[in-house]
Amino acid sequence: MSDLNFFFEVLIGGLLSGVMYSLVALGFVLIYKASGVFNFAQGSMVLFAALTFVGIMEQGIPFWPALVVALVVMMVLAVGIERVVLRPLVNQPQISLFMATIGLSYLLEGLGQGLWGTQVRALDLGIEDMPNETIQTMLGIQVSTFDIFSAISAALLVGLLALFFNKTRVGLALRAVADDHQAALAVGIPLQHVWAIVWAAAGLVALVAGLLWGSRLGVQFSLSLVALKALPVLILGGFTSIAGAIVGGLIIGASEKLAEVYIGTFTGGAVAAVENWFPYMLALVFLLVRPQGLFGDKIIERV
Amino acid sequence: MKKSVLASLAIGAGLLAGASSPSPVMAQAMEQFMPIPIYRTGPYAAGGTGYFGGFMDYMAMVNARDNGVNGVKMIWEECETAYDNARGVECYERLKGKGPTGAAMFHPLSTGITYSTFEKGTADKVPVVSMGYGRGDAMVGSVFPYTFPLVTTYWSQNTAKIKFIGMKEGGMDKLKGKKLVNVYHDSAYGKETIDILNKQAAMYGFEIKHFPVAHPGLDQKAIWLQIKQFAPDWVILRGWGVMNPTAIKEAARIGFPREKMLGVWWSGSEEDMRPAGTAAKGFYAAGFHPAGKNFPVLKDIEKFVQSKGKGNIEAERMGTIYYNRGVVTGIISLEAIRTAQEKFGKKPLTGEQVQWGLEHLNLTAARIKALGGEGLVQPIKTSCNDHEGGGAVKFQQWDGEKWTVVSDWIDADKSLVRPLAEESAAKYAKEKGITPRDCSKEM
């Protein structure tokens, strides 16, 4: 394989990994847009959603009905979170909401594993995670069919969310709530409904991310750790932009893979696991230059 | 009034006298305490629950079937470590003094926690037993009196793995010029075999390249693309938890044959293979015991514990690799207690006394058969200077559904391992100002 082909293989592999990171980052963005809070529980929601789906399938329910039931569970969970956790915290400092999501994270991890067990489970979506022969023949590089499927799924999800939040009244209400809770309430926007809808959308994103990541890693506790991959994406892309989550994911995915291969080789292995720290370093540098991220809203506060 | 005051004084004096005098009710309970630093949560929960589930089930079975070890009932308490070093140390401190005589021994089930607790164990006289993990040089008992890397250390296992690869290649001389890759968990556990692999590479003339994977190892695409560039003949996988199925899937994606992949025993459980699906078929792993339920000891666990609803783990996990490793741990640990009882009496023992039992363990084939563990446990004979005792490894292959043993016991290359261990132990002793015990005087 030529060096150029290898470079493109690393680059494309990185971009497709980035799409997987974006999927997780999307959930964070939705919650942040609606409530201005970093949802610490997003990773746990991914785990809970995947565990629920696999758990339901283990009861003998076929794929599609299990998917619908898992989605309903995530919706009910969203309404429950709004009622029990968020509603009492309206107009409270954002740090209180953040702390509540930390508690929620532990609750969901415990609840999911308590209900469905701690065993590692396989999840087969029927998509082969092997190099796509057509691409290999045409371009001479190996790209997994599963990665292509993930990228298409992510694109569809983003399109759906963009339509929902930009072309519907709920989307308009969301933008108003994100701007100012109290002002939104004052003009009659039902804050509770908006929050429940946004958490339900985050639940949908968690379910899709859980299925795709779970299919690759197995459904197990480690799914909750995929959130770690989303953090530099959010810093880079901005916490309030769906497009930012996608672009940030692509940049992080591609750059970390290229760094692992080329910096790792350059240092002769002296610097270990470049892939793990490079995205954070990149995000940190980016923070110094553009604190709000690529697509984030610039916050101007009068003091 | 005066009478009632005198009566009260008399009652008070009587109570005080009663409290200070010995009472038969307060005699030492016939119980031996075993700490269980489990991890039921976190990314490695499958290993923690399987291993300690098997260990606790074995102790429960011995209690139910034999009324404990020579009449001394095993008792235990769980402490959640989540595979975290700091929490592991906390668990050690919390549990070391429990039970009538303190902890019999401590099984960290983590190389990191072993490194964090073995010096404490030496100071507290609580044996730290790292069966199939921990630091390799701790087999030198003269320097590490309270650390027991029983059965097989990583170093021994590694030499057996190279022997296995040599066998597959048609002889050790065929290793010359071959290219091997070591994909390891970037932790104390993962790094444990780097030096010995480098030495073996120089010895046999193969090229070795090491690739660290940071915890938890969710995405390894870039590493495997580099492996593809390197085009190795064999890949050794030193994974843990989710890193294993991810590595196997990545290998499949670059078209690397799984029949040329060989895992450490922490990469060789059912929980590591099933998430990888068909990609795992053909993968080899080392093991110091097989999987399966067809052993008398497991049938007794089924009869006395699981069938009565008293199991410490789901019944369907019986016979899995992690579960059986816990049962093996139980057999060896309780035999060490039994050995110590022969010297110190059939009563609850202190950690110091159990250390003697661990150091004088002689688990013969006949004894293993009597314990119902024939084919499950290898013979072990320890001594003051040999805290490993066994050293042999079997290899198994995943057929897509289950593990199949594909080799007999393959002995470690002790002529290589032992001098390395002694050299490393001597270095440690010098650093810490330890004067090694004279084992010739401790027979």
Image (tube, helix red, strand yellow):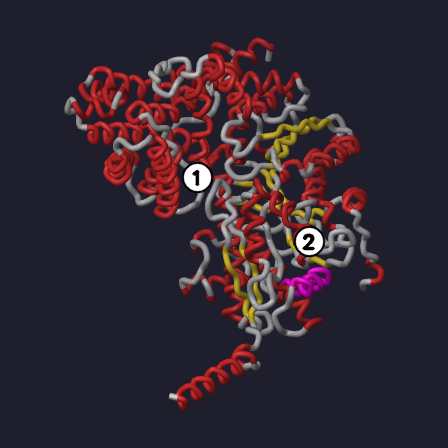
Q: Nearer the viewer, residue B290 or A34?
A: A34
Residue in view at x 57 percent, y 24 percent: B224
Q: Is residue A65 visible?
A: no
Q: Chain of mark 2?
A: B
The residue to which callout 2 is attached is: B148
**Picture quarter with the N terminus of chain B:** bottom left
**Picture quarter with the C terminus of chain B:** bottom right
**Residue B315: horizontal and vertical position, in percent?**
43, 55
Image side of residue B305 versus residue A183, left or right = right
User: SS of the residue at dot 1?
Assistant: loop
Label 1: how many residues lie within 10 Å, few (<14), some (14-19) or many (20+)? many
Nearer the observer: mark 2 or 1; the answer is: 2
Q: Is residue B295 visible?
A: yes
Image side of residue A266 versus residue A208, left or right = right
User: SS of the residue at dot 2?
Assistant: strand
Looking at the rendered structure, the kind of residue marked 2 is Phe
Q: Nearer the viewer, residue A275 or B65?
A: A275
Residue in view at x 35 percent, y 16 percent: A299
Q: Nearer the viewer, residue B103 or A133?
A: B103
**Residue B186: horizontal and vertical position, in percent?**
60, 33
Q: Is residue B210 above or below residue B153?
A: above
Q: What stretch of residues is rendered in magenta? A: B351-368
Residue in view at x 61 percent, y 31 percent: B183
**Residue B141: horizontal and vertical position, in percent?**
75, 54
- Mark carried by residue A220: 1
Residue in view at x 30 percent, y 31 percent: A203
- Mark carried by residue A129: none
Q: Chain of mark 1?
A: A
Image side of residue A177 versus residue B3, left or right = left
